[in-house]
């Protein structure tokens, strides 16, 4: 921040206060407190519990009989066994579901990272707009002083002085408005990071994002966490359908018992049993039909995800390329020329070589150009956040 801008902010009671915040600190804080990640971790724990449940066998059944008729007493154990291959298929489906939920959690981390980047650079944009507005106010005050001097010497009409005062007042109001926007942007970022919203944060990382080659982006997008999650969903649905079909086979229940008869149950013998649960032909296919429909739905989601992700990667990379080119053009060519023209316009007005209206146009054009440069910087960061979200992996290590 230049000394002139800092002086204007101090005079207006708008000196920037707050604690410095790096982008890395913002990422770490958001990752530890984001509600979306807490929900994703909870769903991952539920999936792991379902996996443990799939590995569990049906419990043993203990039976006791007794009475006056034969057999006098009996003790038996029965165990229901899964259909051949059904248990293995259920376990595989649960494992794949856990993998899918884990990949979804990783995708949520990418979404939180992108959201944090947008909020961080939105706050940086607010700070830059305040600085640009403070610069405009400083020039408005200079032009007002020049108009007053020219009016007192009779070299300019009173209309010039009135217009200069209006321009200075409008610049003060604009600065107050932008300061309010800055506090609001800081509070939004503080909410995401779990910080005190009344303390204005001061972002310190302003470097432009890198431009990653499109081929590298497409290669990373092909193995993104969201894509891996959809692939695991399809595999889990296939395993579930296979288990549902196997479970229509005869399901055995085996049992063994010790029975006694005769006087006072003196004669004991061992008895075995085998029960089969049979599915009626043509009936009871609801579970199989539901599993088949779930598989088709998972495949449709996977196909849609693949098409939309590739489109998003290409379009977002194009936006990032254009935004970075615009940033470079503003920094290297446009803004230096803007600063030169506004100073030349003020000097020409002081020397009486140009009218007041030419100065007003030059100062307004300079303010508009600075605002557009700031918006171009934010557009580049926002496009990079969208690109990281589509890829699913960090592309820049702050």
Image: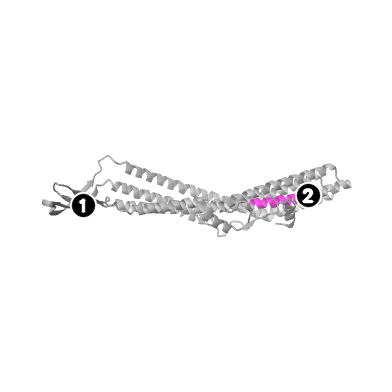
Q: Main secondary structure of the magenta part?
A: helix
Secondary structure of the residue carrying numbered label 1: strand
**Residue plotted at (40% across, 46% down):** 298
Label total for image? 2
Q: Quadrant of the N terminus?
A: bottom right
Q: Residues within 10 Å of mark 1 (few under 14, many from 20)?
A: some
Secondary structure of the residue carrying numbered label 2: helix
Kindly identify which residue carries mark 1.
Answer: 76
With 61 as the anchor, is 40 left or right in this view?
Answer: right
Q: Is residue 346 magenta?
A: no
Callout 2–callout 1 Cβ contact below 8 Å: no
**Residue plotted at (33% across, 42% down):** 289
Bounds of the magenta segment = 125-138
Please provide percent x and percent y for residue 49.
38, 53
- The tag earlier along the polypeptide, 2 or 1, is 1
Q: Quadrant of the C terminus?
A: bottom right
208 over 153 or under it: above or below: below
- Judged by depth in the image, the label closer to the viewer, 2 or 1, is 1
Please provide percent x and percent y for residue 307.
47, 47
Q: Residue furthest left?
A: 263
Q: CA distance from mark 2 to mark 1?
A: 99 Å
Tell which of 141 and 355 is nearer to you: 141
Tell which of 130 and 393 is nearer to you: 130
Please provide percent x and percent y for residue 52.
36, 54
Answer yes or no: is residue 262 visible: no
Please provide percent x and percent y for residue 171.
73, 46
Answer yes or no: is residue 63 visible: yes
Q: Is residue 133 magenta?
A: yes
Residue 141's mark? 2
With 90 as the anchor, is 222 left or right in this view?
Answer: right
Q: Residue furthest bottom?
A: 397
Tell which of 351 and 197 is nearer to you: 197
């Amino acid at each position: 921040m230049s000394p002139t801008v800092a002086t204007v902010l101090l005079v207006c009671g708008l000196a920037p206060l707050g604690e410095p915040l790096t982008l890395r600190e913002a990422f770490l804080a958001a990752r530890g407190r984001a509600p979306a990640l807490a929900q994703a971790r909870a769903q991952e724990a539920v999936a792991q519990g379902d996996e443990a449940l799939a590995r569990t066998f049906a419990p043993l059944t203990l039976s006791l009989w007794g009475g006056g008729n034969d057999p006098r007493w009996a003790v038996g154990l029965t165990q229901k066994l899964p259909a051949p291959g059904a248990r293995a298929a259920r376990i595989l489906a649960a494992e794949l579901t856990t993998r899918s939920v884990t990949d979804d959690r990783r995708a949520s981390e990418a979404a939180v990272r992108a959201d944090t980047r947008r909020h961080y650079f939105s706050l940086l944009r607010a700070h830059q707009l305040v600085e640009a507005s403070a610069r405009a106010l400083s020039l408005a005050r200079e032009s007002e002083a020049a108009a007053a001097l020219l009016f007192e010497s009779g070299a300019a009409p009173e209309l010039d002085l009135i217009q200069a005062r209006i321009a200075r007042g409008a610049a003060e109001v604009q600065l107050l408005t932008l300061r309010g926007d800055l506090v609001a942007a800081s509070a939004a970022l503080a909410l995401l990071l779990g910080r005190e919203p009344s303390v204005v944060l001061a972002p310190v990382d302003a470097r432009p994002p890198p431009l990653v080659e499109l081929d590298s982006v497409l290669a990373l997008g092909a193995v993104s966490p969201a894509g891996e999650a959809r692939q695991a969903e399809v595999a889990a649905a296939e395993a579930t359908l296979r288990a549902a079909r196997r479970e229509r086979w005869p399901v055995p229940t085996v049992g063994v018992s010790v029975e006694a008869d005769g006087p006072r149950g003196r004669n004991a013998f061992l008895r075995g049993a085998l029960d089969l649960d049979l599915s009626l032909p043509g009936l009871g296919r609801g579970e199989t039909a539901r599993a088949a429909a779930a598989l088709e739905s998972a495949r449709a989601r996977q196909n849609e995800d693949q098409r939309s992700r590739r489109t998003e990667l290409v379009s977002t990379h194009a936006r990032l390329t254009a935004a970075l080119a615009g940033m470079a053009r503003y920094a290297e060519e446009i803004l230096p020329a803007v600063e030169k023209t506004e100073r030349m316009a003020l000097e020409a007005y002081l020397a009486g070589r140009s009218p007041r209206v030419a100065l007003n146009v030059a100062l307004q054009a300079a303010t508009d150009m600075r605002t557009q440069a700031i918006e171009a910087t934010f557009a580049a960061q926002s496009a990079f956040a969208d690109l990281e979200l589509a890829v699913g992996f960090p592309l820049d290590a702050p």
